[in-house]
Amino acid sequence: MTKFLIIFYLIIFSLYILFSRQPDFFDGSFTTGIIHYTKDSTGNNIAKASFTLDNTSYNMNASYPLRSLHEGEQVAIIYEASQPQKAALYRIWGYWLRWGEILASLVLLIGLFQISKAITNNPTPEGLMSELEDVRPRKRRKYS
């Protein structure tokens, strides 16, 4: 059951990631941008990626936890042609994998696994009796 559950989790989570990204991976366009650090209102340095489309310059927040970017670094940017101001940095960490989604899905996986174990490990006496009264022959493997 554990192998099935892990494989099922990986398939469902992979499909969720593939079809839930914004800007959309299948309809999005790619360009390159340059990282510049600017100070915000609290005085912290924030990484911003700047790119130009059709003589219009766009700046987007490129900061994300556990992502290291250097001043002047060229990065890939994905955007939708209708809304280039909502562009995203095209990286594994931050575009495809996000810490909040990974954490929430793992908590859900572990919680549901513990619930299913609790239900199947402690059957009711009526369930045990009906299982013992079952006279159907058990399926056996062809090669054991």
Image (cartoon, helix red, strand yellow):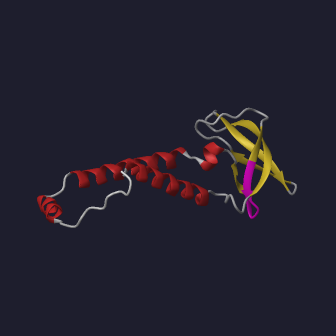
Asked whether, in this view, residue 131 is left or right of residue 74, the answer is: left
- Residues shaded magenta: 77-84
Query: Front-most of 20 and 127?
Result: 127
Q: Does residue 31 sit above or below 34 in this rendering?
A: below
Residue at the image point whose x is 25% and y is 54% from the top? 120
Q: Quadrant of residue 45?
A: top right
Q: Magenta includes 76? A: no
Considering the whole magenta stretch, tell me its main secondary structure.
Answer: strand
Residue at the image point whose x is 71% and y is 36% from the top? 38
Asked whether, in this view, residue 76 is left or right of residue 56, the answer is: left
Q: Magenta includes 78? A: yes
- Count the marks: how many? 0
Residue 2, percent from left and from top? 38, 49
Q: Quadrant of residue 37?
A: top right
Residue at the image point whose x is 71% and y is 42% from the top? 48
Residue 30, percent from left and from top? 77, 53
